[in-house]
Amino acid sequence: SMLTGHITDAETGEPVVAEIFVEGIDNTGVFRFPYMSNKKFGRYYRLLQTGSYNITFYAYGYESVTFKNITIDSSGQTILDVALNPTSSTIAVDIKANGSDGLLTVLRGIPVSITVSLDPGVYAGHNEDWWCVADAPSGCYYYDYNTKGWLPGFHTSYQGPLGEVSPPFEVLNRSDLSIGSYTFYFGVDGIMDGLINFGYLFYDSVGVNIIP
């Protein structure tokens, strides 16, 4: 059986790329890529067993909406068209170097502490890609949340639901950084697929210069 429909902007009627979240299926702790409506038409499809479901639609810049007890039967398609209302709500992300938002310049051997914080606002619980990346003189590195360490390359730090990060969480504290310029980035994006989706990305950055 299939649930399908179109997701649009309630004010303009334009299609919206949104996540279709089914309670009891998408929150079981088993990783799965989110089901999204397509960009061109806002059309979505979900294959579901017969039964009754609570279904939530999420999209950046819009108020989420939940439909409770949607009945899926074996007769064919269940059509549910959704119009989302725009909102000014955002996700607040912050990254600091030694407690500063601005460019930090320190002598080699001086400890550098990088901390991150996040306020998910209305998007709390929404599954996202989390990114914490460093552009260093020797290349690109990413913070791996599982090992609590930095690894070479460009990769998500974590994939999962948004929650408040407060007080700030320290991702680096080292006094042996090599001389040169560093940029540290922290952000989240709303399509949990392991790729940077700039239209759904909230991020912050901070620079660090290590001098002789």
Image (cartoon, rainbow, N blue to C red):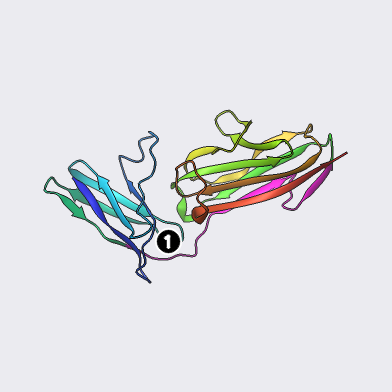
Farthest right residue? 212
| Res. 212 image quadrant | top right
Q: Within the magenta stretch, is there residue 90?
A: yes
Residue 57 part of the magenta-drawn span: no
Residue 36, x across and y down, in percent: 36, 50
Q: Is residue 172 above or below residue 117?
A: above
Residue 137 image point, x, y percent: 74, 39
Q: Identify which residue, 141 or 172, lies in the foreground.
A: 141
| Residue 167 horizontal side relative to residue 178, left or right | left
Numbered disc 1: secondary structure: loop
* Residue at the disc numbered 1: 62
Q: Is residue 72 left or right of residue 194?
A: left
Region in magenta: 83-106
Residue drawn at (73%, 45%), measured in percent from left and top? 97
Circle 1 crowding by C-alpha within 10 Å: few under 14, some 14–19, many from 20 = many
Q: Quadrant of the N terminus?
A: top left
Please count the marks in the image: 1
**Residue 2, image x, y percentages:** 21, 47
Residue 140 versus residue 61 in the image, above or below: above
Q: Quarter-wise, where is residue 14 in the image?
A: bottom left
